[in-house]
Each structure stands twice: as C-alpha cells, then as structure tokens.
Amino acid sequence: MNVIGLCGGSGSGKSVVSSFFASHGIPVFDCDAAYHALVSAPTPCVAELAEAFGQKILLPSGALDRAKLAQIVFAPGAKDKLELLDRITHTYVKAAFDSWCRDREQENCQAVVLDAPLLFEAGMDRICSITVAVVCPREIRIRRITERDGIDARSAEKRMDAQRSDEELRRLCDYTVVNAGTMEEINIQLADILHQIIERGILK
C-alpha cells in the first residue's frame, strides 16, 4: 500500500488538500486529530508528557492542558522542550498510524494519505511513496491561525517560526500546492497532481 505524505505549516490549509484526496476515495489519516485524541483523556501519552513537563500541564480531568503546554514549548529559547514534546508524541502518533494502516490493508486500499504537519521531523517521510507540501503566504496563515485558535498574531508567528519554512518544504517534497487563491485554482493544481500520481502507478 502506497503512502502519500501531506505536510505544511500551521494555517497553510492542509485540510482543503486532504479533503480533495478523500473525495477521490483515498483514506486520510490526520495526525493532528490523532494527537488530540491521544491527549484528550488520561492516556499513556499524557502520563509521559506529565512526567517530562510536570503535573501543571494537566487538566483536573487528567487530560492535557494544551494551552499550558504550548506556553512552555513555544517560549523563547525553549527549542529543546519543543523537540522533547515532538519525540514523545510522535511515538504514539506513529503507533496509531500503523494500526490504522493495517485496517486499510485489510480493506485492500491502494493508497492512503498521511496528513502530518511534522512529516519530516517525525521521520515519517521515509515511509511515503510521494510527498506533497501545502504552502501559503505568511499573512494569510497568521490570519487563519488567529481566527481558528483564538490567539494573537505574535503567538501565531511564534508557532509558525518553530516549523519548517515554505521554501524548505518546497525543496523537500515531490509536489507543492499553493493554497492562496480560489477553490477553483486550488482544485486545478490538485487535479494535475492526482493525474501525475496515477501516471506513476501509485493509484490506478
């Protein structure tokens, strides 16, 4: 089974691209959704995070207080803490993806999409047949993040600056989608990529 890796920085609009693939019958594994499920209740993942960052990151329910953890890992000079967070969570997300893939193989799927914002940081690009980057102008990303997450522009910029740049993602990936225009313009790009994927034999 082929894996199509999909990545892009916060606010780039990966959901538009993953929805396109899903509409063409390609199952999508959303790493962000998997992470949220892993930390929304007392789980082994949350327990390991609490051990690493302290009990202060927990809600009374035992779930992760994501806002408090974000204050720690996105603070100035906290790169080592962000890397620790990634090391812990990537292990659990990878395990969830492996389990999900086994189910898709039982369904005889030809290919799946791995929607992973930190595809390369997690080393999951190594299991992908092809990779697709979603990029978008910085000012649009900031607006999307602030509206979506209810944070200020400076906090949005800190989050973006902790991720790979669009230029680097363009260089690393096989294909790039620029998500800054109309849906028609985006769909034209995606249709062309889908055609090339089929030509490469990743889909039939």
Image: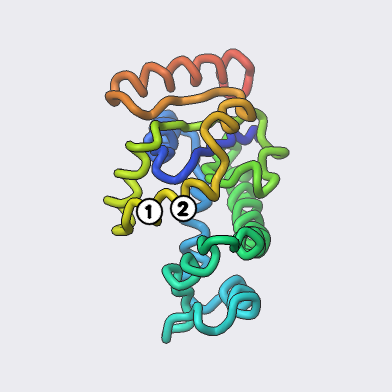
**Residue 156 visible from this viewpoint:** yes
**Residue 44 visible from this viewpoint:** no
Residue beneath label 2, please?
158
Residue beneath label 1, please?
154
Q: Is residue 163 left or right of residue 152?
A: right
Secondary structure at badge 1 equals helix
The residue lying toward the viewer, choosing from 82 and 30, is 82
Q: Is residue 105 left or right of residue 147?
A: right
The residue lying toward the viewer, choosing from 102 and 55, is 55
Residue 60 appears in which quarter of the rendering? bottom left
Q: Is residue 185 left or right of residue 75?
A: left
Local crowd size for mark 2, using a 10 Å CA cut-off: few (<14), some (14–19), many (≥20): few
Q: Are marks 2 and 1 in contact (CB under 8 Å)?
A: yes
- The picture places residue 105, in percent across and down from the top left corner, at 63, 42
- Which residue is found at the position 63% from the left and 62% from the top? 92
Residue situated furthest right in the rendering: 126
Q: Is residue 38 above or below residue 105?
A: below
Question: Given the image, on which type of amino acid does mark 1 rest?
Answer: Arg
Residue 168 appears in which quarter of the rendering? top right
- Which residue is found at the position 49% from the left and 48% from the top? 30
- The picture places residue 180, in percent across and down from the top left corner, at 34, 28
Question: Given the image, on which type of amino acid does mark 2 rest?
Answer: Lys
Secondary structure at badge 2 equals helix
Alpha carbon of mark 2 to alpha carbon of mark 1: how far?
Answer: 6 Å
- The picture places residue 102, in percent across and down from the top left corner, at 64, 49
The residue lying toward the viewer, choosing from 131 and 82, is 82
